Image (tube, rainbow, N blue to C red):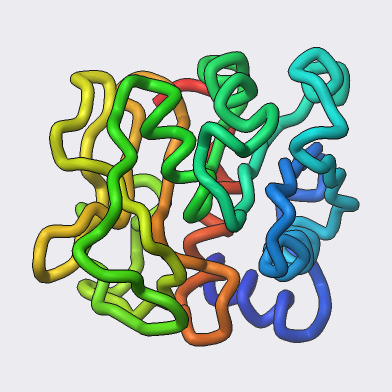
């Protein structure tokens, strides 16, 4: 009932209850989708979202914001070219919940020792069925659900022990990873896309988590 009421409030232009004290920081990896994410995060929380370009802020600058939640955006490059993203993920793990989207997801994988590889084929603007483990950001979401993908790189399935697979496609491509101790999650798909019908629900789940650890 509370979740349904929260969705009605958002549809009417009001934020979901209990999130108005959040301090959300987005690391912008120069992607056209970044401000879709910012808009969704603002609508859900009712707060002003702070946005920093990946080459215009330092880790200390992000920490000075004392964020309650950090989102690492999509982008057109690789984690090696994503400015402060990888360094920030390592610094923020255990301090604040972190969500990485597309390039941000790959950056989480690389930050903790995973390998970013080229996928079997580029997937740009296509939808896929996403299977998941029903936990954390996926709690209460349909199984499976439809999401939009824009990427040519993926995380190799030989993940380091600190990461677990949280979502995948029918053919086994990793669509989500989760740190086993810290509140750090990545999704390869785009929750901010209009064709990802449950995108706002996933982002609300992320923002509803308080504390930097599981």
Q: Looking at the picture, how far across and down is residue 176, in whole percent? A: 32, 50
Using the image as rendered, state which of residue 67 and residue 121 is in the foreground: 121
Q: Looking at the picture, how far across and down is residue 129, in whole percent? A: 24, 77
Residue at image x 86%, y 20%?
A: 61
Left of 149 or right of it: where is 31? right
Locate the C terminus and report the quarter of the image it occupies.
top left
Using the image as rendered, state which of residue 178 and residue 213 is in the foreground: 178
Left of 114 or right of it: where is 200? right
Q: Looking at the picture, how far across and down is residue 54, in whole percent? A: 75, 37
User: Is residue 197 something one can see in this rendering?
Assistant: no
Q: Looking at the picture, how far across and down is residue 107, in whole percent? A: 48, 36
User: Is residue 206 something one can see in this rendering?
Assistant: yes
Q: Please tell me in which quadrant of the rendered image residue 57 appears.
A: top right
Residue at image x 42%, y 64%?
A: 151
Q: Please tell me in which quadrant of the rendered image residue 70 appears.
A: top right
Note whether 46 is above or below 158 in the view shown. below
Residue at image x 46%, y 21%?
A: 213
Note whether 62 is above or below 173 in the view shown. above
Left of 6 or right of it: where is 213? left
Residue at image x 75%, y 18%?
A: 59
Q: How many marks overall?
A: 0
């Amino acid at each position: 009932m509370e979740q349904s009421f929260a969705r009605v409030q958002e549809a009417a232009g009001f934020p979901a209850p209990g999130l108005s004290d959040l301090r959300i920081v987005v690391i912008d990896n120069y992607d056209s989708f970044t401000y879709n994410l910012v808009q969704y995060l603002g609508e859900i929380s009712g707060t002003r979202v702070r946005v920093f370009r990946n080459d215009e802020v330092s880790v200390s600058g992000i920490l000075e914001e004392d964020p309650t939640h950090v989102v690492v955006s999509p982008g057109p490059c690789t984690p090696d070219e994503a400015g402060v993203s990888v360094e920030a993920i390592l610094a923020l793990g255990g301090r604040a919940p972190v969500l990485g989207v597309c390039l941000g997801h790959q950056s989480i994988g690389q930050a903790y020792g995973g390998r970013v590889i080229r996928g079997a084929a580029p997937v740009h603007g296509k939808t896929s069925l996403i299977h998941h483990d029903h936990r954390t950001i996926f709690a209460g979401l349909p199984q499976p659900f439809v999401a939009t993908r824009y990427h040519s790189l993926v995380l190799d399935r030989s993940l380091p022990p600190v990461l677990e697979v949280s979502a995948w496609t029918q053919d086994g491509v990793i669509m989500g990873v989760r740190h086993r101790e810290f509140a750090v999650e990545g999704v390869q798909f785009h929750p901010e896309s209009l064709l990802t019908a449950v995108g706002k629900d996933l982002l609300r789940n992320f923002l509803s988590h308080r504390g930097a650890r599981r």
